[in-house]
Amino acid sequence: MSKEDLRRDAFEYHRSPKPGKISVHPSKPCLTQRDLALAYTPGVAEPCLAIAENPDLADEFTSRANLVGVITNGTAVLGLGNIGALAGKPVMEGKGVLFKRFADIDVFDIELNENDPMAFVDTVARMEPTFGGINLEDIKAPECFVIEEELKKRMNIPVLHDDQHGTAVIMAAAFLNALILQKKQIEDVTIVCLGAGAAGFACMKLIEQLGVKHDNILFLDRKGVISKDRDEEMPPHKAYFATSRPERTLAEAMKGADVFVGLSEGNCVTAEMLKSMAPRPIVFAMANPTPEIGYDLAMSTRNDLIMATGRSDHPNQVNNVLGFPFLFRGALDVRATSFNEEMKVAAVHALARLAREDVPQSVLKAYGATELRFGPTYILPKPFDPRLIEVVPLAVAKAATETGVARKPLIDAKAYAQELVGRIDSSRLFMRIISDKAKSRPTRLVLPEGEDETIIRAAIEMKEAGIAEPMLIGRKSVIEQICEHGKLETGNIEIVDPTVDNSRFASLSDAYYFDRKRHGVLRSDAATTLRNDMNLLGAMLVRQGFADTMLSGRTAHYPNVLRPLLKVLGHDNTGRHHQVFGMYIMVMEKGVYFLTDCTVNVEMNAGQLAQLAELAADTATSLGCPARVGMLSFSNFGSVDHPETRKVAEATRLLHERRPDLVVDGEMQADTAVNDVILKQYPFSKLKEPANVLVFPTMQAGNIAYKLLRELGGGTAIGPILLGLPQQAHVLQTGASVDDIVNMAAIAAARAADK
Ligand SMILES: NC(=O)C1=CN([C@@H]2O[C@H](COP(=O)(O)OP(=O)(O)OC[C@H]3O[C@@H](n4cnc5c(N)ncnc54)[C@H](OP(=O)(O)O)[C@@H]3O)[C@@H](O)[C@H]2O)C=CC1
Ligand SMILES: CC(=O)C(=O)O
Ligand SMILES: [Mg+2]
């Protein structure tokens, strides 16, 4: 993007549809007179008095515990210098967006016209009642050191100067990984740090703590290398790294150096300087928005370097966005009274470790990448990696607890990890619970579309995650070719090659013949039919117990998969047909809902609706969501007399008779089913809380509802899940992504684990 385009787009982004990037949204309803009386006077007096008596109750009755103040005086805004508090506001609002987006933390950005450090401290310290934590931002050195130290002493909440410690944590994680890749030892490497300010000092202090030798660091400011013989009084942070070595200029310092860390200004490093560095150098040009040396120039100058910048438009973004949201999340959750070294070091190792792990498909998709693997262009996790929220705050919270600064120590790490996952994406939390269940018992899952690359990728991911033991149906040679081309490793995933004769195939074709002989299948044709229809073959593997479940349909039209599947699995040995239904799980901000029948039966009678409700309720409950069933119609408990409403009322009656254990009622309108307040108008209803299983009177209604929720309601749809088959088998949506398939595998495996 050209500079002009960037400028135009950035103005537009900040201006429209309304000025700025953040706004305040109430988290409670304020619609009725009653709401008003609770939100404001007289009701509000009650929490006020309670907090006056016990200040800890502020965490319970106010948003303080999840509220961070992002505070600046605008003296070192990015690498733009002292542009003042007001001009720094877009950056502070931006930090607010990132806090919310990545860690669900609310932010008030505060820009203070105050350059006197102690006056700044007095102002911020007085705000302790407002905030759960303080993120100091873009305050220049050396004032930032005094400000942070004083505030840490005076405040009993975590205070972090992001440009120092947020940056240092990320830089250190990237540095540890780059050392591994460049095969250099931490105690041997020589470092040039250009920029002797807030960020530079904190980065050097942290890597020194991790093992870099003090004397191996050259620290530079605008005047060059900070040496002991400078004839001026130096601030303590510069004096700390002052050297007795002879180098004086940046060019001299760079000669033979292993590592360059830039935290200064754009474009102050030349290609010549880069060329003079040691073999296999590490270059972190982190000035924002323009790095000390451009990415392209650096990469074209040498091919043995690991290069990173602070920007998001090149590989290896070393930027504190990976740090502050997660550091604060962990600290706030255990009500830490401060940030200590152990918490920062725990975050460093958590980040570095995560970058060395395999990258899930969801991250590849977010970045439009086919591969991200630990290596020279991937030394840190990507900011949109959903695993960050799970891994980094947990490490920070553990360290806070172990070092005694947690007012609310971490007790159950597993439960906390789950809570973290649900913070920014409720569908991930739901899927995490389902995956845990799936992992509790090995499930053999057959994938008839084994010659499809997405299916192969999903198989690899579900195997690696321990969700299921996949079996790919397809010609071995074709699957191997796809893997070679896509650089995929299937490891020991079983391939069922339909062209190969073996005893299992013979027994399947025998069984198929005996099952279908009265449906026109000749003995001589059975093997050929199975060989030519992978879905039939997959279903037979399930029927004969060679697999526990099957997923197919990514590359086919829904009915073309459903038909063979029902042909094989849709009846028992006596020939009696199973009634099959289709259900979608909708993960919404408000919770998880089970919607049915969305995909199989166009029309249903009362008996079928009752059967469907039972199956859906049992499935929801087995997936960890105790069922509350709403039988939906356009009438509330007889308010409209019509054959359609009577059908739903009759289904409800049958259910009450057959399954008194089920929490189910109807017929009712959709809003009655899901709205607590409306539901209370029907105190006789067996449904006392809003329904989470929604049974629609026709497929038309169910199908429309789930699609509207997905498109307009922002819900994540998981499914369709087939109900009613004695064995688990499900049809994928056409074009399903790796994540969709892995999610469905987890559901299928979790259901199979119940059998
Ligand atoms: N990627 C990331 O995550 C982050 C990047 N940064 C970037 O780091 C830079 C510094 O930020 P911060 O430490 O907060 O600011 P400070 O104002 O605290 O420090 C700036 C330091 O850079 C030095 N400096 C500036 N220009 C030059 C130059 N041309 N040559 C040599 N030294 C120079 C200054 O020297 P002197 O002391 O002589 O004035 C000073 O020591 C900014 O560009 C900022 O965007 C900061 C935080 C995070
Ligand atoms: C990223 C950041 O905080 C800075 O450049 O100042
Ligand atoms: Mg900053």
Image (cartoon, rainbow, N blue to C red):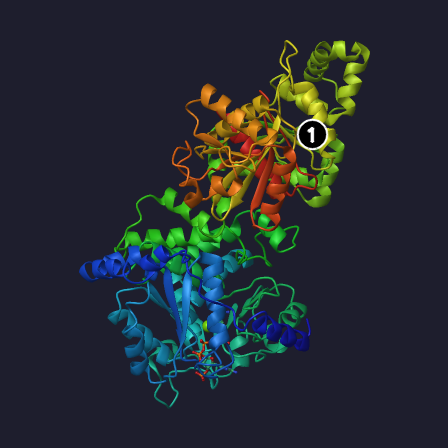
> Element at badge 1?
loop
Q: Is residue 88 above or below residue 426?
A: below
Q: Give the total of numbered labels.
A: 1
User: Which three-letter amino acid code belongs to the residue tagged 1?
Assistant: Pro
Residue at screen point 57% across, 62% down: 316
- Given residues 61 and 103, the one toward you in this image is 61
Q: Is residue 38 above or below residue 427?
A: below
**Residue under the image location 80 percent in, 11 percent down:** 522
Residue 191 seen in the current view: no
- Looking at the rendered image, the quarter that the N terminus falls into is bottom right
Categorize mark 1 by other alpha carbons within 10 Å: few (<14), some (14-19), many (20+): many
Q: Position of residue 312 (x, y in %)?
A: 58, 65
Using residue 209 as the reference point, say whether residue 612 is left or right of it: right
Is 582 positioned to the left or the right of 232 in the image? right
Relative to 224, residue 382 above or below:
above
Residue 745 figure quarter:
top right
To which residue does mark 1 refer?
448
Kindly identify the residue that appears in the image at 72 percent across and 24 percent down.
564
